[in-house]
């Protein structure tokens, strides 16, 4: 994976919900600070759905901090944010493109 496209897997970490959100914030803050990352793929998994809801709710509270949030179910080349986000980070290979995978969420950084 390139420096421009990073993956955070908090869905398979065994973290509590609170700990997973702390990990998410810490990682995203580090990526923003380093200034090289453009897109972050968050794997929150399916599970009970609590982590996905919490991640997406957290993203809503961060309005303005990110260029866009793309839900995995919308991640395809026909979605303008997805297409532009992918172009911005060099269109890396991503097996989830077009798969309507609700277990992931993408954050497009400024």
Image: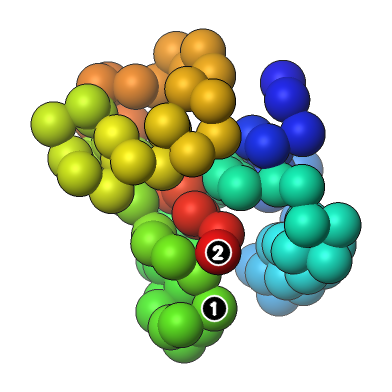
Regarding mark 2 in the picture, which secondary structure is present there?
A: loop
Residue 100 drawn above or below residue 81: above
Query: For this rendering, which residue is in front, 27 or 47?
Result: 27
Left or right of 51 in this view: 85: left
How many numbered marks, from 0 up? 2
Residue 105: x and y, percent? 44, 48
Residue 101 drawn above or below residue 32: above
Residue appearing at x 77%, y 34% in the figure? 3
Q: Are marks 2 and 1 in contact (CB under 8 Å)?
A: yes
Label 1 belongs to which residue? 65
Near mark 1 (Cα within 10 A), the count class, few <14, some 14-19 or many ≥20, is some
Q: Quadrant of the C terminus?
A: bottom right
Near mark 2 (Cα within 10 A), the count class, few <14, some 14-19 or many ≥20, is few
Give the number of the mark in front: 2 or 1. 2
Residue 64: x and y, percent? 46, 82
Residue 96 drawn above or below residue 41: above
List the single residue furthest toward the left: 78
Picture colour scheme: rainbow
Regarding mark 1 in the picture, which secondary structure is present there?
A: loop
Residue 63: x and y, percent? 43, 83
Q: Is residue 104 visible?
A: no
Residue appearing at x 78%, y 69% in the figure? 29
Specify the label residue 110 is tagged with: 2
Q: Earlier in the sequence, mark 2 or mark 1?
A: 1
Left or right of 9 in this view: 19: right
Specify the label residue 103 is tagged with: none
Corner quadrant of residue 97? top left
Residue appearing at x 47%, y 22% in the figure? 91
Q: Is residue 97 visible?
A: yes
Q: Quadrant of the N terminus?
A: top right
How far apart marks 2 and 1 lie (CA) works out to 8 Å
């Amino acid at each position: 994976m390139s420096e421009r496209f990073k993956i955070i897997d908090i869905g398979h970490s065994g973290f509590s919900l609170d700990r997973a959100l702390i990990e998410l914030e810490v990682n995203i803050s580090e990526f923003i600070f380093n200034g090289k990352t453009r897109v972050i793929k968050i794997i929150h998994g399916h599970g009970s759905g609590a982590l996905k809801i919490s991640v997406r709710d957290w993203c809503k509270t961060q309005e303005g901090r990110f260029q866009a949030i793309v839900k995995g179910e919308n991640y395809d080349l026909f979605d303008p944010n997805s297409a532009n986000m992918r172009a911005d980070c060099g269109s890396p290979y991503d097996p989830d493109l077009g798969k309507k995978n609700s277990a992931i969420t993408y954050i497009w950084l400024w």
